[in-house]
Image (tube, rainbow, N blue to C red):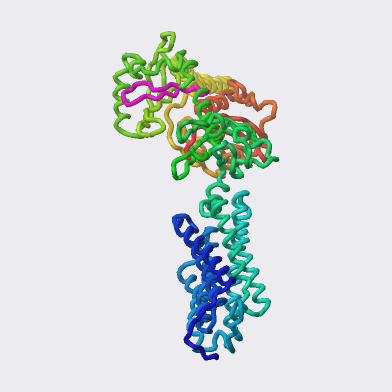
Amino acid sequence: MCTESANMEFAPGILTWILVAIAGLNLSISVFAFRRRGVRGAIPFAAIMVCVSFYSLGTAVRAASVTLPSYRIGTIIKYAGILLLGPTQFWFALVYTERSSLFNRRRWALLLAWPLGVFLLVLTAPAHDLLWNVQGFIRSAPVAEVARTDGPVVWLTFIYHFILAIITYLLIALIGLRRSAKYRIQVILMLIGGIVPLVGGMILLYLMSPTAAWDPTAFAFTITGIVFAVALFRYEFLDLIPVARHKLVDVMADPVFVIDAGNRIIDVNEAGTELFLDQAKDPIGREASDLIPSFDSLKDDSGTHNSEVQIETNKGVRFFNTKETTLTDRAGTAVGSLVIFRDVTEEYRVKKRYTRLIERSSDIVTVIDRDGTIASVSQSIEEVLGYEPNELVGANFAETVHPEDQEEIRSELSNYVEEYGYSNTYRVRVSNADGEWRIIEAHARNLLNDPFVEGIVLNCRDITEKQEQKRELERQNQRLDKFASIVSHDLRNPLTVAMGRLDLLESEMGDEHNESLVTVQRQLDRMEDIIEDSLTLARSGEAVTETSETDLEVLAHDAWENVDTGEATLVVKQTLQLQTDRDRLLNVFENLFRNSIEHNESTDLTIKIGPLSDDFGFYIEDNGVGIPENEREQVFEEGYSTNKDGTGFGLAIVRDIIRAHSWEIRATESEMSGARFEILCVKTVN
């Protein structure tokens, strides 16, 4: 340890003043940056330049020192810059690259613990040898030097500083060099301004002389000041935020262009470049009207202009909403414009698809307002009712319907107005363009509070033919009922008389006539079967209008009990829930069971029932002799039978009942080579 004198004397030379000028330049840059503190990154950048100024100023003071105490003052100033430079550079890198969230207060405390501890040792250096051991002080023109031996703490401090500096400039390089030209130049200047002093520091360490008066790092900060001044004033370093640009512009799917006052492109993101059919040339500096599609149509005297354009791109035709905003300086003078193309191709296609669906729909889509006035009508009204779409716009919907239906319609519409989302279906008579009354089924929903609709939506369809078909079906059913009554009354009465007379003959005639009597009895029984099957067949075709939920397995077992099945076996693989007319479907099972028993030996006969695997429906199959392939269509015809005692109506009845449910039936072959009937159900419940 060297004993110090309290005298502090300075003899500045040309080297000292150069270093002071360097410190002043860097300090001026820090003041400029601080004044722009509203810009992200300005504060940490100002802190860096203050540290650089301290480094140069401390070196200047040491160079001008005549005594050891004055030299020590320069060392304290210089180390203040050295120790804080690494953390402030790292702070700037985190802010510049938007990684500030990686460091919380605890991590910053740990990071600053070393430099603050070392600075405390620098302040108290005369009282210990923890940092270095001073052997002597030499004053020789033009700089002063000190002979000392540095300890491990000094070298660890330099390592700490270099590690932070390397991390700092790696972060800046990785983020910044991927940006466009203007930002890339900005980042290169930053790297030069930071790396040159870093190289100077490495040279100093290589010489193993941190106390050398000719510190190349301090002089390298001259370059730092110059390049950062260029970055500030030529490339607007604190006005451009590359990371924000990357986040908000480069990664945007929307094309973005920046145009200067001369209508030249000065910046464009990647999505914007993809709009150019000729991507071989750099767009920067070229005329906007030559490259930007529909650019001339965007120009407007107002500050902001919006329009829609259709552009042929490398990906095909695309649709865009464009927004052109005038950019001004602080004085309000226009300096350029920002053009954003928002790709609305998918929205456009969805809108067009929706419009086409409405236009091509066979239903009439009508929107009426709160008072019942028609606001819009779809194109389909022309095909359905013969009106032009705009012909009814403005008319009151209630006045377009039959006078007898108007009161009901007005009552319905008043309900819609009161309750948002309310819906209902009703039928009214509407006159077409030829003056004919058509029956319209309308499904209405209240969407008055929907900002995209603001009305009551009516989906209307012409059901006139459907209603006429229904009435015709009802008339047919009435005729069938009348026929069934005639058959039941006019044929059953003579048959009953004949059976009574046969009973009298059996008691009066001898045994020699038994065979004839048996034949007559058999024919009378057959006539009764024909009458019964005819009645069933006549009624089987009536459309099913009322249904209930029916369990397939329960229904099958009930039908099995109603038929003489002998020794046959019934197997239900799995049940289904069907919406059906239970009594008529029971008749289907009875006829199919009876058909299987009549055409096969019941001893080893097995009848299986289960659901279809590919369609909703069920099957009934057996392991009997089956139905020849060429007869599978004929078996459902009236009168067709391979049994001489059969009426030929059984499967015809099955067919008609299935059709009355709007179902389908087909005959095929079972896995056991027997007969299989598959019923495909349409009206079902889950």
Quadrant of the rendering where the N terminus is positioned = bottom right
How many discs mark residues in the rendered view? 0
Residue lying farthest top? 434
- The residue lying toward the viewer, choosing from 144 and 216, is 144
Percent coordinates x, y for residue 100 in the rendering: 50, 62
Residue found 64% across the figure and 70% down from its top: 200
Can residue 504 be seen in the rendering of this structure?
A: no
- The residue lying toward the viewer, choosing from 606 and 404, is 404
Percent coordinates x, y for residue 96 in the rendering: 53, 58
- The residue lying toward the viewer, choosing from 506 and 64, is 64
Magenta stretch encompasses residue 363: yes
Q: Quadrant of residue 651?
A: top right
Percent coordinates x, y for residue 447 in the rendering: 37, 32
Q: Is residue 139 above or below residue 471?
A: below
Side of 652 relative to 450 (left or right): right
Percent coordinates x, y for residue 414 in the rendering: 29, 26
Q: Is residue 242 above or below residue 482?
A: below
- The residue lying toward the viewer, choosing from 109 and 131, is 131
Q: Is residue 387 above or below residue 323?
A: above
Per the rendered image, the range of residues in magenta is: 360-377
Can residue 290 be seen in the rendering of this structure?
A: yes
Magenta stretch encompasses residue 470: no
